[in-house]
Image: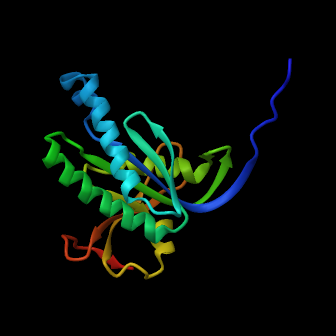
Amino acid sequence: MTVEAPLRAGVVQGTVMFTDIVGFTEFNALRGDEEALALLALQERIVRDEIGDDARIVKELGDGLMLWFADACEAVRCGLRLQERFEEESWRVDAPLWVRIGLHSGQQTRRGEDLVGHDVNVASRIVSLADQGEVLASEATVERTDGRLPEVVFERLGPVVMKGIPTPVNLFRAERAGQRSDDVVGR
């Protein structure tokens, strides 16, 4: 009997994005497995079309995906492009590809092809707070955009307490400039 060596861990800096299809369980119950699988494939195809060379799909998580981006600006831009594409495709295929997106930047620990750690956990909590069609970003992500996104505004939502996260996280809604927002921070 041979014992396999543990997967090598390494630390990376970047932005983690989680996507989650809103209402997927009900869609599956009403329309069946075949249509549910087609909706998942559509989401993955759109994501693969939109992510750049400095990003990757880390893994599939039921009806969502975990992605990693080297650059926070590209993560925010991609999140907004994805929401536009998801809306367009929903109309085209007559299926509710309603997706929420959460972003958090920081340090992740690599375990093989997977990423783990506190900052990954924060990103996973953020996506659960987003509504369909929203891109929510942590303050850490907004800070890493460092004024390089003139086409994006960030609406301050305030500090949010999240299960299992010891300190509140300041959240922002990312939107294209010119969309609705009252308390906005241009970055």
Task: Report the quarter where the N terminus lies.
Answer: top right
The residue lying toward the viewer, choosing from 2 and 168, is 2
The residue lying toward the viewer, choosing from 184 and 60, is 60
Residue 164 placement (x, y as % from top left): 53, 43
Q: Is residue 36 visible?
A: yes
- For residue 90, above or below residue 156: above
Q: Is residue 166 visible?
A: no
The residue under the point 39% across, 79% down is: 187
Residue 68 placement (x, y as % from top left): 52, 55
- For residue 21, above or below residue 46: above
Residue 84 placement (x, y as % from top left): 24, 59
Locate residue 83 relative to residue 161 in the image: left or right.
left
The residue under the point 25% across, 51% down is: 86
Q: How many marks?
A: 0
- For residue 7, above or below residue 81: above
The residue under the point 38% across, 63% down is: 78
The residue under the point 18% across, 39% down is: 95
- For residue 60, above or below residue 100: above
Residue 109 placement (x, y as % from top left): 67, 51
- The quarter holding residue 149 reads bottom left
The residue lying toward the viewer, choosing from 71 and 129, is 71
What scheme was used to colour the molecule? Answer: rainbow
